[in-house]
Amino acid sequence: MKLYWFDTVNPRKVCAVAKYLQSPIEYAYVDLAQGKHRTPGYLALNPNGKVPTLVDGGRILWESAAIMCHLAARCDSDLWPQDARQIEVIRWLSWDLANFYRAGGTLYFEHIIKPRLQLGNADPAAVAQATGDWRRLGAILDNHLQDRNWLVGNAISVADFALAAFLPYAERAYIPLDAFPAMRRWHERLNELEAWREPFPELAEAA
């Protein structure tokens, strides 16, 4: 398998799952700052011109949630459960993409990506809207996590890797994580995993 990645939030999720599962991955670094995601060769793999992309034999997958589920299913991991919990995992993945990710993604883009790629200053109106949305949605997630270690059932799943994606960047992205104690405890549990703390491969490995 070959995974095309860049050190941003969506590839981080996939790299963390791959490392957690010890998947046999060949890594290929796609330098977004140099426009490598817009080359004809890469667009032939992923017409969206985004990362991550996974090539597994004759199968090409893009979208981080699909890739995480594929990696887990490929090695029969309970990260992608094959019982009634699967519906709950899908529910949280859907809620994340439709709601939570948008708020976190805006703060991440405005405070981290814009300076990194020299795209100008943060937009105060966008930041204010996203901060309010994140607080409102964060309260839903924090309430769910009050008496739970993990999002679904009693074990970690791809839903945890997905919904916690912005938490490692909370301080730099001005995400108000401190207001949500259950979410902080959840992220502390994730930080006990080396795969979560240090998900990305060395660039030399991804040559």
Image (spheres, grey):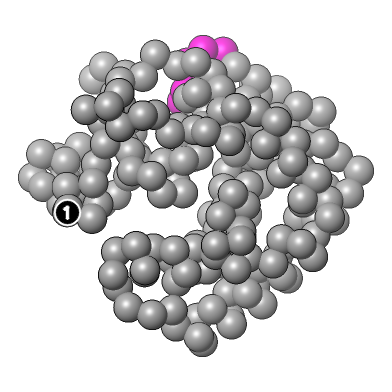
Query: Which residue appears at 29% of the width and 49% of the height?
Result: 50
Residue drawn 29% across the image and 64% down it: 117
* Amino acid marked by disc 1: Gly
Location of residue 134 in the rendering, given as x and y in whole percent from the top left corner: 65, 68
Q: Position of residue 57 (x, y in %)?
A: 26, 17
> As drawn, is 51 to the left or to the right of 95?
left
Which secondary structure, mark 1? loop
Between 35 and 42, the one nearer to me in the picture: 35
Residue indicated by mark 1: 35
Q: Which residues are magenta?
A: 70-76
Question: x and y percent of residue 162 in the render?
Answer: 57, 43
Viewer-closest of 33 and 66:
33
95 is higher (above) or lower (below) than 21: below
Find out whether residue 203 is within the magenta segment: no
Task: Say whether residue 81 is visible.
Answer: yes
Magenta highlight: main SS: helix
Residue 76 quadrant: top right
* Quadrant, the C terminus: top left
Residue 3 image point, x, y percent? 32, 29
Quarter where residue 181 is shown: bottom right
Q: Nearer the viewer, residue 42 or 19?
A: 19
75 sits to left or right of 118: right
